[in-house]
Image: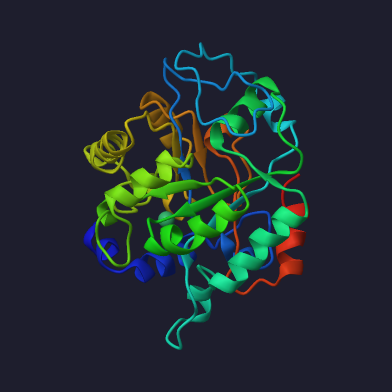
Amino acid sequence: MTKNFVSAGLGILFFAFTACGSGGDSGKAAAAASKDTTMKSPADVTVPTTPGAADTANVPANFSGKVPPPAVILGRKQVPVLCYHQIRDWKPTDSRMAKDYIMPPANLREQLKMLHDSGYHSILPDQLYAYLTNGAALPDKPIMLTFDDTDEDQYTVAYPEMKKYGFKGVFFIMTVSLGRLPHYMSKDQVKELYNAGNVIGSHTWDHHNVKKYQGQDWAIQIDKPTKQLEAITGTPIRYFAYPFGLWNREALPELRKRGFIGAFQLADKMDPTDPLLTIRRIIVAGGWNLKTFDNAILHDFK
Ligand SMILES: [Zn+2]
């Protein structure tokens, strides 16, 4: 059940598209969404204690977990969370669907420049968590940049471009791909992203649909990959992204039990009982122009 995903990155993207192209309340070009994030939430959950800090990657390790009722979290204005996959120019062989998951570098540059010129500030998951749970202040025009699937061009193309503007992001790693150069990042590259202040999240071992896990799947897809990422970064991994953006309610306690405090889906509605484990994102489709990009950020997060 795992091998089909292991081989081709693009295969993953195609599958992702089909699998999560359903529903979602963001409509339009957002054929976009299919990645996710992971979070932990057990006893040692940590929460940022520095409201408003713009760059808080460090969170006290002993937050006792005062999570407000879901209605409070759902009542806060959503922060736009963008999801990217491959960052490269299109090839003649790329299908129309695949192009939703392939962002040409020139377009990404344009988008990041626009965000910077418009006054946006990138925030990280701990800041979002503090905002959602405690109402902690965020910088003006907050936005979160997330990257799924371990593609190396996220390191070679997106990362340098983000540095120009002081942007930090979240990289959701599918550990089966680690070291599969040149298409995927190496462990050293992941470590460098982390050392530079970006957040590393879990995206399972080989991109299997969380809704289908049973028995050992939790250990294979979640426990072992999380340990590996923690060994690489030397820090707890608290955030998760669902492959294909797909999740179900049964999965939520399983993630919490494993220490995730936040999990990212795609464009479906957040779960009314556990919004922190169903945070919304949109995929920025490769064919979007700047106006579509701007509209999505302004109107897809209420
Ligand atoms: Zn993915």
Q: Where residue 134 sits in the image (x, y, percent)?
A: 66, 20
Q: Where residue 225 sits in the image (x, y, percent)?
A: 28, 41
**Quarter of the image where the C terminus is located:** top right
User: How many labels, in total?
Assistant: 0
Q: Residue at x 63, y 23 (%)?
A: 133
Determine which quarter of the picture holds residue 282: bottom right
Q: Where residue 194 sits in the image (x, y, percent)?
A: 41, 41
Q: Residue at x 53, y 46 (%)?
A: 169
Farthest residue, direction front: 164
Please state if 31 lies on the left or on the right of 297 as rendered.
left
Vertical relation: 87 (above or below) 123:
below
Please state if 288 lies on the left or on the right of 201 as rendered.
right
Of residue 158 and residue 42, the one placed in the foreground of this image is 158
Q: How is the image coloured?
A: rainbow
Q: Where residue 231 sits in the image (x, y, percent)?
A: 26, 34
Farthest residue, direction bottom: 92
Determine which quarter of the picture holds residue 161: bottom right
Q: Residue at x 48, y 64 (%)?
A: 157
Q: Residue at x 51, y 60 (%)?
A: 158
Of residue 159 and residue 63, the one placed in the foreground of this image is 159
**Quarter of the image where the N terminus is located:** bottom left
**Ligand 1 shown in quarter:** bottom left
Of residue 290 and residue 268, the one placed in the foreground of this image is 290
